[in-house]
Image: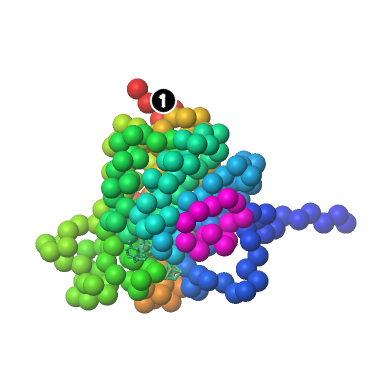
Amino acid sequence: MTRERIVAKPRLLVPQTAGFVYCPGCHEPLVAKAIAEVLDELEMGDSAVGVFDIGCSSFLLGILDIDSVLGPHGRPPDMATAIKHIYPNNVVFTVQGDGGLLSIGADPLMGALARAEKITIIMINNAVYGTTGGQMAPTSLAGQKTTTTPGGRDVSKHGFPVHAAEMIATFKGTAYSVRCAVNNPYNYGQTRECLKTAFAKQMRGVGLSFVEVLSACPSNWHLSPADALRWIEEGLMLEFPLGEFKNVDKIE
Ligand SMILES: Cc1ncc(C[n+]2csc(CCOP(=O)(O)OP(=O)(O)O)c2C)c(N)n1
Ligand code: SF4
Ligand SMILES: [Mg+2]
């Protein structure tokens, strides 16, 4: 009987011999795996450049086996812009947290959107500042307890959650804007398809592409990995519905 290998470690993932840096139940490694699989499938591993932000996405530097650089907090869209202008034939993407992209990095994001840069921005929406201990992020839900909102996010004082994928879709220079999740095999597969589309829009020079991924942070949600998985569906997805908010092949 011949045996066919149907599952293997993605080629572009670096073996974590010294231990794994992500917390148990974190979804960011799944996003890394999806990126690695898609780049390999598209044969873009040698030409991809990842620009990672300060935050838990900085761990991707040692996880994805591609050319990559770490930006000052919030600045990856500026760095990706520069890299893309110098190397227009390479696929250039950022991976950033919701804090990094939408609060300290709001200015670089706005600039890249306004200029319609041909880059891909991937945002991990875990509804907190994960790395620094679970402070309120722009995406924290109304009523969500965080270290800076111990009584729960009070929208009359702290404002409302920011819907990045919907907002980015309103920019003329955006070719593609989508919200995904990796909480079950079906959604993981969809995320892979979204990443493929986002990279394709960039390489066809259509415009900026954006992929938001809902991602569990069990450590700062103070939930077990299993309960965190449930809260993705019962909490986050109610505020942040999955779906495509823009998908065009030409910007006119
Ligand atoms: C200029 C600057 N300001 C603040 C910090 C502290 N800091 C590091 S990571 C972080 C927040 C990260 O949250 P997010 O971007 O949501 O990423 P996550 O860790 O949740 O993946 C902050 C405020 C910093 N490193 N540099
Ligand atoms: S702090 Fe949260 S986002 Fe960061 S590695 Fe741990 S679970 Fe993941
Ligand atoms: Mg975050």
**Horizontal and vertical percent position of residue 148:** 23, 72
Q: Looking at the picture, which amino acid does disc 1 mark?
A: Lys
Membership of 213 in magenta stretch: no
Relative to 19, residue 176 above or below: above
- Label 1 beta carbon less than 8 Å to ligand 1: no
Q: Quadrant of ligand 1?
A: bottom left
Relative to 78, residue 158 above or below: below
- Which element carries disc 1, helix, strand or loop? loop
Q: Which range is magenta?
A: 58-70
Q: Which residue in the protein does label 1 denote? A: 250
Question: What's the residue at 54%, 52% (across, down)?
Answer: 68
Membership of 60 in magenta stretch: yes
Q: How many marks?
A: 1
View extreme (right): residue: 1
**Horizontal and vertical percent position of residue 5:** 76, 56
| Quadrant of the image containing the C terminus | top left
Question: What's the residue at 50%, 30% (across, down)?
Answer: 204
**Horizontal and vertical percent position of residue 220:** 36, 73
